[in-house]
Structure formats: structure tokens, C-alpha cells
Amino acid sequence: MTLLDDLMNRFSGQISQPSNKKYPAQQNYSKSQNSNFVVQHRPGYTKITEERAMEIPAVSSTVNLITSAIAKLPINLYKTDGEGDAELIRKDDRLFLLNQEPNDAQTASTLKKRLVTDYLFYGGSYLYVRKKARSNAVKDLYRLPVDKVSVIRYEEQGFITKYKIVLDGQPDNTIKTIDVATILKDTEDGFKPRGILNEGYKVLSSALDGIDFSSSILKNGSLPLAVLKSETQLSPEVIDRIRADWENLYSGVNKAGKTVLLEEGLEYESISLKPNELELTEFKKANISDIARLFNIPESMINANANKYNSNEENNIYFLQYTLEPILINIEKALNKTMLLESEKKSGYYFKFDTSQILIITEKEKAEIAKTLNETSSVTQNEVRKVLGLPKLENNYMFLSQGKVFYNTETGRAFNPNMGVEFDPENPVDTLKDDGSGNSPNRVENQVEEEKNIDKKGVEEDDEGTT
């Protein structure tokens, strides 16, 4: 085998073998031995932690997109009345905790961002709803770190009847389950979740190996990559000396492009190992696509070259419906279960995210929505101005349209239901003037004139009586 063949086999081997380290198939790993957020080891693949996964640019970008989008969404409280209409509850202490300051150390956006991060990587997250002493009123909210949480389950006749939450594996450090909002993604028993670190270990491991391989080429590769040939057989000592001198003079990014000086009898042959020829470019594209599918996010949101939609609005609709809504629904259900009293649940109270900010992106789109609302004549001007982010008008009003006019084919007359006017379409003005029914468009002006005449006549009669 020639040196060139050996070199190419070595490079291709690095691409196809993600890792040589083996792990027992049944061995489990988690940040806490008792934690339910378990990351399993798989044979032939590297253990993936959250920190390592975030070193992958596509993963980091995706996680930040999802968590930041949810973190900025306000949570509203509604109450359903007897007719099924939702009434927005504006004053409630729980809304301040969910949207402003959940505790003394955090803001609501940072808390929601971290909860969603746990949800994505580990398949679930825990929110401690601490209540005031001897009261059902909520005092503050805290995120329970996944590495400190363990769930003790109690089974009866093959199914789980109850469970309790323990922190740091200490039985004395137990939190009531009714005070913890458990937000789970994928779970078989309702307690043990499965996140991206479990479901996507192959994709994440391959992506990390590709990054490490590319880095090793830039760090250790001789640029330009080449083969040195000799017509005579060289002794091992000479080969070792030439290799050492070569690496010392030409290896590494900082020494790229230096002039190569050869000893007598040596020939230099360049080897083309461009990223495209090593299939690194295609490898990265495939990994980005796999990561997008893993997080169920439109690939165009992390790769501009993959945009298959005509507008940002279509992208955002997909992002909202298929990426965010499953997460939002799970969070809403967990909040409803933990933060609402039983009497409130029966009365129709529920928490819900306001997702309108996701669909409105540009000023042009805002203007188009406002125009559409105006044309429907179904909202007031202040409601339209709210969409545009403008202050309310003191005199709120609504545009109305006269709509359709009904035409009677038998009588040949038309009727405008909005004005309450019946007229002859061929001669509408004269019809209304001579109608005498008071349905003229000028009937208000006529009525005012008549009232003036009556008042004037009354004054004249009073003057005559006085005289």
C-alpha cells in the first residue's frame, strides 16, 4: 500500500467512524443518579451532554430560536362564560409572576427560556409553585434543576397510583406533587420523559464527530496536503527526521503557504483534499437537515439556502403550529393543573399563551392585517390601532358598510336594509323625495327644518298674543 492510499484510507476512516469508544448497551447516564432525566449510552456513539450538544451550531441556533420565541410570549388568564365566550382576566397576582417577576432572582423570560431548554434536551421540566403559608395563594415560582429532581413512584396492581418528588435524593427534602407543574414531552408512564439527548443521540454524535474532524484537519493538517516521494529506499531514521522537519516547518494553519524546500532525491506531489471532495460540505448539510427534523423546526430558519416558503409569514405559521404549539399546550396544561384552584377549573378559568406576536413580523404585514380588519367592519378603530401598536383614540368608532341592496323583481323596487329606505332604482332621488314616508336620506334635514318652522310659528303666535 502506498503512502497516498494509506493517507486516504485514514481520512475516510475518520469520517465513517464517529467514535471508537464503546459503552455497554444497558449502561445509563444522568446528571443525578436518582434523576428521571436519563441519557442512555449507545454502543459506538459518544455520550452526549447538554453542554456538548450546544457546541453544535445548528443545535445552539435551534434551541435559542425555540426558547427565545416562547420566552417572549405573554401568558394570559381567561374565564369561559355560560355561552362559551372567553373573558380576559386582567387583574390576577399569578399573571405578574408568570409574565414579570416569578421570584427575587429571575425574570419571567429567563425562567421560561430555561424551562423550555430542559424540555427540549431532557424531555421535561419541573416548575415549583411555592404557596404562601396556610394559603392557596401563589407566592413565587422556581425552576427545579433536572439534575436535582427524582420521582419516587408507588405502584399498585401494575399501575402507578401516586408519586412524590424528592430533591438531591434526600427523602427529607420532599415537595408536594400538587405544588410542582410537571411539563413532559414524550413519556410512556407519565413520569419518565425522553428528550433530544435520548432520541437524537446518533444525529448529535455524528454532528460532533464531523466538527471535531474538520477541526483536526485545520489544526494538524499540512497545507498544502501532499506526498513526498523518493526514488531510493529511505531508512527509518531518515523518514522520522524528514517527518519531524516537515511538521515543524509546514504543519498548522499559521504556517500555510510557506515555500517547500526539498532535499535532493525527494519529489513533492500535491493531494487535493478539499472539503467538497472529502464530502464534508454535504455531510454538514445532511446534519443540519437531520437536526431540523429532530427539533421539528423549518430548516430554512437555521439554513437560508433551504427556504421553500414564499414569505416569512408562512415560515412562522409552520413554526408556530408544528414546533411551538405542542410545547405551549403542555406548559398550559401543567399550569392549569397546578396553579388553578379546583373551584376555578370548574368555573372555566384557564391559562393560555398569546401567540399573536409570532405571526406579525414586519410593518408591511401589520398594515395588511389592519387593512383587512377595517374592511370587514367587525372591529373598532382602537382594536385596529392595537394591532399597529398605536395609542387608543378618545372617540372610538367603527367603519360600517351599506352592504348589499335587495331588489324586488316583482315590484321593481329596491330596499337598503342599513338605511331602511325603499326606492325605485331607475329614479331613486325623485322616489325618495315624493315618497312621503319619511325614508328620504334627507329626512333628518327635513325634520330639522320642520322643527324650526314650528318653533318660528310658535314665537309669532306668542308675539301676537302679547300685542
Image (spheres, grey):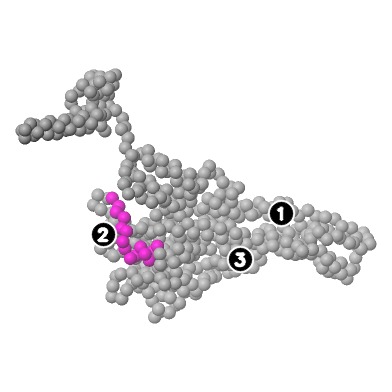
Disc assigned to residue 275: 1
Q: Residue at x 73, y 61 (%)?
A: 217
| Res. 159 in view | no
Please identify, in this view, whether the residue under mark 3 or under mark 1 is nearer the observer. Answer: 1
The amino acid beneath tag 1 is Pro
174 left or right of 449 in image? right
N-term mark: 3 or 1: 3
422, 172: nearer the viewer: 422
**Which span is picked out in magenta?**
85-99
N-term mark: 2 or 1: 1
Residue at far front of view: 467
Label 2 sits on residue = 346
Q: Residue at x 23, y 24 (%)?
A: 432
User: What is the distance, in whole Å, between disc 2 and disc 1 at their CAs?
Assistant: 62 Å
Helix, strand or loop under label 1: loop
Q: Is residue 93 magenta?
A: yes
Within 10 Å of disc 2 (Cα), the crowding (few <14, some 14-19, many 20+) is few
- Image x and y of residue 304, in percent: 59, 49
Q: Residue at x 37, y 62 (%)?
A: 334
- Image x and y of residue 337, in percent: 34, 63
154 left or right of 29 in image? left
Label 3 sits on residue = 46
Q: Is residue 21 magenta?
A: no
